[in-house]
Amino acid sequence: MGEINKYSGLIYCADCGRKHYLYRGRTVKRESYSFICGNYHKHVGEEKCTPHSIREVVLDEIVREEINKALYYARNNTKEFTDYISKKTSSQYRKELNAKTAELSKAEMRIVELKSLFKRLYEDNVLGRINDEQYRMLSADYNDEQKELEATIPDLQKEIDTLKNECTNVQKFLDIVRKYVCVQELTPEVLRTFISKIVVHEREKKHSQTSPQQIDIYFRYIGTFALPGEINQAEEKTHDERRTA
């Protein structure tokens, strides 16, 4: 229980947007620890979201590999790296900022709508249009949805603020690169120096431990990065847990 989760606040579900949580289960073997979607973790057995599970040791390998890849290319091909990032990232940040802003607006509007629905529900109960049992069931559903939205809004606002403040700045990333040659260990400091967030997609076959899984890694100041030969396939890139078996 007292172990530090070095990825805390960095991993998000690709489908519902909720944060991932470190799940240890009953095992004491660290190689079995996994990250799972908070929406699934909170609503196990319900159709809120799927696990989007990924083992910590697998994620460590993927993230370390991607950081070292970016380090090597930025250090040895600085001009090409700068040109590529400058061209790609401005549109990427703008697209993501617009999407998050729309998501925040939708959540805020839904809260206003829920308050109105709850008021109408109360009036219907008082006037005898619905019985007490129906009132309890519906009001509980509305309250749960409102609580979830109210918990999500601060995270969305934080992401929007980060996107606004962390616009493309290749030079800041290059300043970081100068301090590192190769990352051997992923400490909390290293992760927060290089990574702004990690987005985990569901596997092609849900609940499978070997099915390919897409992981999107967003670097601070530059967003996602792919080597020149990977750029055209960047959106389709997947990682397979079998590589660590």
Image (cartoon, grey):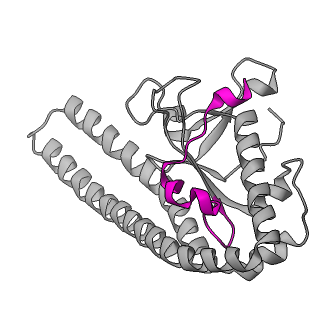
Is 205 one of the magenta-colored residues? no
Residue nearest the observer in this picture, 5 or 146: 5
Q: Reply above or below: 229 against 40.
A: below
Q: Residue 109, percent across and down?
A: 31, 65
* Image-based side of 128 in relation to 207, left or right: left
Measuring 80% from the left and 27% from the top, which residue is drawn there?
Answer: 30
Q: Residue 3, percent across and down?
A: 83, 37
Q: Quadrant of residue 112?
A: bottom left
Q: Reply above or below: 129 against 175.
A: above
* Image-based side of 111 in relation to 18, left or right: left
Q: Residue 93, percent across and down?
A: 52, 73
Measuring 58% from the left and 47% from the top, which residue is drawn there?
Answer: 19
The reply to whether residue 167 is in sight is: no
Measuring 86% from the left and 50% from the top, which residue is drawn there?
Answer: 187
Q: Reply above or below: 47 against 158.
A: above
Figure quadrant of the C terminus:
top right
Q: Quadrant of residue 204?
A: top left
Residue nearest the observer in this picture, 187 or 91: 91
Question: Magenta span covers which residues?
Answer: 218-245
Measuring 55% from the left and 61% from the top, which residue is drawn there?
Answer: 231
